[in-house]
Amino acid sequence: MGIKSFQGARKQQNTAEVIAITVNDFMTRNLITFRPEQTIQEVVQILITNKISGGPVVNENNELVGIISEGDCLKQISESRYYNMPMEQHTVENRMVKDVETIDGNMTIFDAANKFLESKRRRFPIVENGKLVGQISQKDILKTIIELKGQNWK
């Protein structure tokens, strides 16, 4: 009778699945947007009411035409006061940033985080087929990292 070799159950190798976390997965889709013809006073009221620091400006076709922020509004208020000019006549179109940098929704959260660090921006809109579809902020990325703590990602 020959000797039989017995190997115990093999321990499964730790092949944890690597998850690619994209901007599309965590961007805000239900956005508060502004229109070019709105007054700065209207924008300030919306920013305060909704506890946001700015947002995208879109035209009637939901195409991104700019971004308006608290800073843009503060500048307008300061200049209006300095020059003793009424604020009612000042619109978003006159104060918004028109050269808006967007990011690809398929970009990973980590690449987006690096883009935030390089650009010093607080938010990036996401556009698909010429239409605004969402926005991602620095806070969205931080929330994502906390939610996914302990998972493998790339």
Image (cartoon, rainbow, N blue to C red):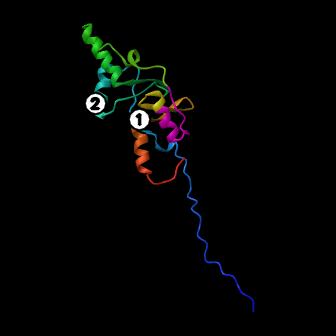
Q: Residue at x 75, y 89 (%)?
A: 2
Q: With 17 as the anchor, is 37 left or right in this view? A: left
Instruction: Please name the residue that numbered disc 1 is placed on.
Output: 31
Range of the magenta residues? 101-116
Give the structural element (helix, strand or loop) at label 1: loop
- Based on the picture, tell me whether residue 106 belongs to the magenta stretch: yes
The image position of residue 107, as x and y in percent, is: 55, 38
Residue 48, numbered circle: 2
Give the structural element (helix, strand or loop) at label 2: helix
Q: Residue at x 71, y 85 (%)?
A: 4
Q: Is residue 85 above or below residue 13?
A: above
Q: Residue at x 53, y 41 (%)?
A: 108
Q: Which quadrant of the rendered structure holds the N terminus?
A: bottom right
Q: Residues within 10 Å of mark 1 (few under 14, many from 20)?
A: few
Instruction: Give the CA distance from mark 2 to mark 1.
Output: 15 Å
Q: Residues within 10 Å of mark 2 (few under 14, many from 20)?
A: few
- Based on the picture, tell me whether residue 27 belongs to the magenta stretch: no
Q: Nearer the viewer, residue 99 or 109?
A: 109
Does residue 98 appear anywhere in the picture? yes
Q: Amino acid at mark 1?
A: Leu
The image position of residue 100, as x and y in percent, is: 48, 24
The image position of residue 96, as x and y in percent, is: 41, 20
Q: Amino acid at mark 2?
A: Ile
Number of numbered discs on residues: 2
Q: First in sequence, mark 2 or 1: give its number.
A: 1
